[in-house]
Image (cartoon, coloured by chain):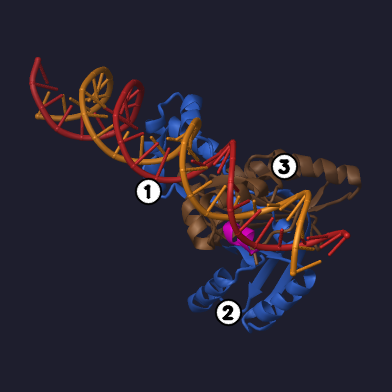
Chain colours: A blue, B brown, C red, D orange
Amino acid sequence: MPDLDAFDRKILEILQRDNTTPQRMIGEAVNLSAPAVQRRIKRMTEDGVIRANVAIIDPAAVGQAITIFVEVEVISETAEQIEQAKQAFAACPEIQQCYYVTGEADFVLVIVVPSMADYEALTRRLFFGNNNVKRFRTFVAMDRIKVGLGVPTS
Amino acid sequence: MPDLDAFDRKILEILQRDNTTPQRMIGEAVNLSAPAVQRRIKRMTEDGVIRANVAIIDPAAVGQAITIFVEVEVISETAEQIEQAKQAFAACPEIQQCYYVTGEADFVLVIVVPSMADYEALTRRLFFGNNNVKRFRTFVAMDRIKVGLGVPTS
DNA sequence: GGCTCCACGAAACAAACTTGCAAAACGACT
DNA sequence: AGTCGTTTTGCAAGTTTGTTTCGTGGAGCC
């Protein structure tokens, strides 16, 4: 993965805010022609710098009103058990984000569900139904203050 | 915010996976003409169902290698203090996501930084430098198993 | 100097998006 | 059942955007 110059970083800055921005406008903003911008975007996409281009949907608009954080602590941390847990979490559509972490917990999950009843059913399936889960701690989001996947491009 | 029919939901499903998909292909997938798809997308964008269109960047590619979770517990939970905390967190570029939650903590943060040294400096500025922070708990991500903002559209 | 290798910009080209318009689908009311 | 009004659709033309081609100029290297 080659390193990025100032042009690339400026382009990324714009794209991670709005990837429908015409290449012509990006070109004006960074002092480059549209084809040059296009080639850089293509290269960064091929190199995996740009991982995806997606629309962000308001969860409430599709009936997924509740966001929940869960810390999960497991009993056995063998490579096999961890791998199995990772796959189970990754396959669950309600789980929006899943990280394997150090600290007082082993996994941190971000879950999106229509109602608390749905969350209750999910815990039954995901945690109580898995005998390697020692404990889990739930945090219900009252306010989504800042949501996104933007990163500083410095 | 009007409700969405089966066409809209299918379109959203596609767009939140790849919003560069041509409207013609979306049309084929949902059995609608391209202009019909275009009008629905426009309407959903105006209605705020589609919140943004963004490129997702690999943090490591721009030197932001470390993802960290933080639970923050505050001392005083007056409306004014909470509001102040929200604004401080929202304004911080290293903070990628911030939620105000119920449970054993008051805020949950997702932070992206280049190194642990940067995180240490950030805690100094953000937590130790704020006398309303009672305690904070850090979880360093070892593996990003599932990352995204996709939601079930069904 | 002469060479190759890249990245660039201008222009031509292809593809996608957008708009106008008439016809079809749907509801409400008689 | 029939009619009117509203809404949404598909088609076709027009416009914008994305992509490729080609020739030029600069950096590094014999």
Q: Tell me the SS state at disc 1.
A: helix
Residue contact at pointers 3 and 1, CB within 8 angstroms? no
- Callout 2: 10 Å neighbours few (<14), some, many (20+)? few
Amino acid identity at mark 3:
Ala
Q: Tell me the SS state at disc 2.
A: loop
Q: Residue at x 52, y 73 (%)?
A: A87
Please state which of the two labelled residues, at mark 3 or mark 1, is closer to the viewer. 1
Whole-angstrom CA distance, mark 1 to mark 2, is 39 Å
Q: Is residue A147 above or below residue A13?
A: below
Please state which of the two labelled residues, at mark 1 or mark 2, is closer to the viewer. 1
The main secondary structure of the magenta stretch is helix
Q: Residue at x 37, y 47 (%)?
A: A1
- Is residue B115 among the parts visible in the rendering? yes
- The percent position of residue B23, horizontal first and vertical second, equals 50, 51
Whole-angstrom CA distance, mark 3 to mark 1, is 32 Å
Q: Is residue D8 above or below residue B119?
A: below
Amino acid identity at mark 1:
Glu
Residue at mark 2: chain: A
- Callout 3: 10 Å neighbours few (<14), some, many (20+)? some
Residue at mark 3: chain: B
In front of the other: D12 or B91: D12
Residue highlighted by disc 3: B90
Q: Residue at x 71, y 76 (%)?
A: A123
Q: Do dots 2 and 3 share one subunit?
A: no
Q: Do dots 1 and 2 share one subunit?
A: yes
In front of the other: A17 or A25: A25
- Which residues lie in the magenta part? B6-12
Residue highlighted by disc 2: A76
Residue contact at pointers 2 and 3, CB within 8 angstroms? no
Amino acid identity at mark 2:
Ser
Residue highlighted by disc 1: A46
Whole-angstrom CA distance, mark 2 to mark 3, is 37 Å
